[in-house]
Image (tube, rainbow, N blue to C red):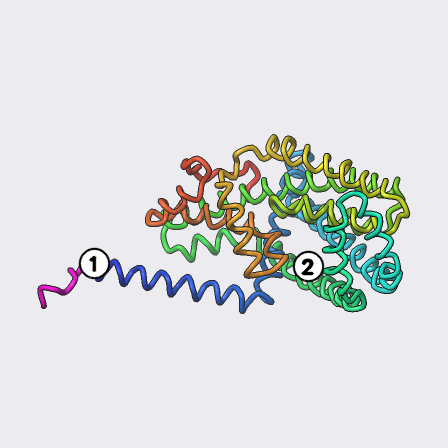
Amino acid sequence: MSPNDPPAQTKLKLSVVRDVVIVLTLVVLGLYAGSGFLIPLTMALLVNVLIIALSDRVISATHAPVWLANIAGVTVVLAGLFMITYIVGSQATQFARSVSTYENQFDGAVNRITGLVGNDVTKFVRDNLISIDMASVGRILLGSATSMLNQFLLISLYVAFLMAERLAFRKKLQLAAGNTKTGAELASVLDAISFSLQRYVGVKTFISLVTAGISYSVFRVLGLEYAETWAVLTFALNFIPSIGSIIAVVFPAMIALVQFETIGPFLVIVFGCGTIQFLIGNFLDPALLGRSLNMSTFLVILALTFWTTVWGLIGAFLSVPLTVCILIIFSHIPALRPVAILMSLDGRLAEAVKPSQTN
């Protein structure tokens, strides 16, 4: 060995870094290339978590049999998802058919905002938005509506099989682990993931329903077109951290600007719905979720950027649940605990918490 050669320990560290980079690159490429398969599967897993959370609440409240509680959970959750899919799909078709009327009303809307933001901003808006082909937007909406229906059917199929194997899965996990200790550790990780996801999905669903319900009341009072669609989007966008609530106000506000001859409805939506989003997002949401997720704020934004880049808009919805899973898995692997500590909010990692009704 030459005296100038690096020591064996340095070579080992470099080889580990190289291998980690290669593995991470392959994982990202796999996530991107397999999005068509992985996204419905991930959505089905989250829907399954929501069903389990609901069925556990039914059991604790009514002491109903497990099979009856599972049927109740499946019925309620899938019926809700079907309603959301139907509303968005049907109204997307209506919007696509009437999209030409919005093109005709666009100039009037641009003139109305001149008094609010000035001529320079108005010129920028006109130059950048006037070139949008609304017919293409309509075709995209029609395609999205069809895609949503297909995804709903696929997700429902996945959920049915996941629920059918719910009770048998833990037994198979113990057998696959090979020994009692490993099986207990795997069960502990799954319990922690399940508990955190149930809490997050349950609380966010409740908060989003409240926000969407109040916003829908405002839209109906104003007579906003496609009020049901904007309410559904408000519900869905509240699952996107930070920017989701802003987008949920911007979309209906812009439609109000185009639809109405006066600027009043636009201001009501901006300040009324905007205030609702601010109060719920800054007071009700933290009060219910608290620090249970224990995720760094910077990590939330970083996860949002990463998953949106890899999986698009659906990735934005799934960014927090997916990152919660990664954080919990890392916290149970000794070699990756330092990474989990850096990902956490305050450096403390909670032990696996088992829900009272875990089956």
The span picked out in magenta is: 1-10
Q: Is residue 241 visible?
A: yes
- Please tell me which residue lies in front, 56 or 151: 151
The residue carrying mark 1 is 10
- Please tell me which residue lies in front, 202 or 162: 202
Alpha-carbon distance for marks 2 and 1? 51 Å
Residue 326 percent across, percent down from the top left: 47, 50
Mark 1 residue type: Thr
The residue carrying mark 2 is 156
Q: Residue at x 40, y 43 (%)?
A: 342
- Please tell me which residue lies in front, 173 or 262: 262
Q: Is residue 82 left or right of residue 353?
A: right
Q: Residue at x 43, y 66 (%)?
A: 26
Residue 225 percent across, percent down from the top left: 87, 51
Mark 2 residue type: Ser
Q: Is residue 275 above or below residue 34?
A: above
Q: Residue at x 73, y 41 (%)?
A: 209
Sequence order check, earlier mark of 2 and 1: 1
Q: Disc 2 on helix, strand or loop?
A: helix
Closer mark to the observer between disc 2 and disc 1 = 1
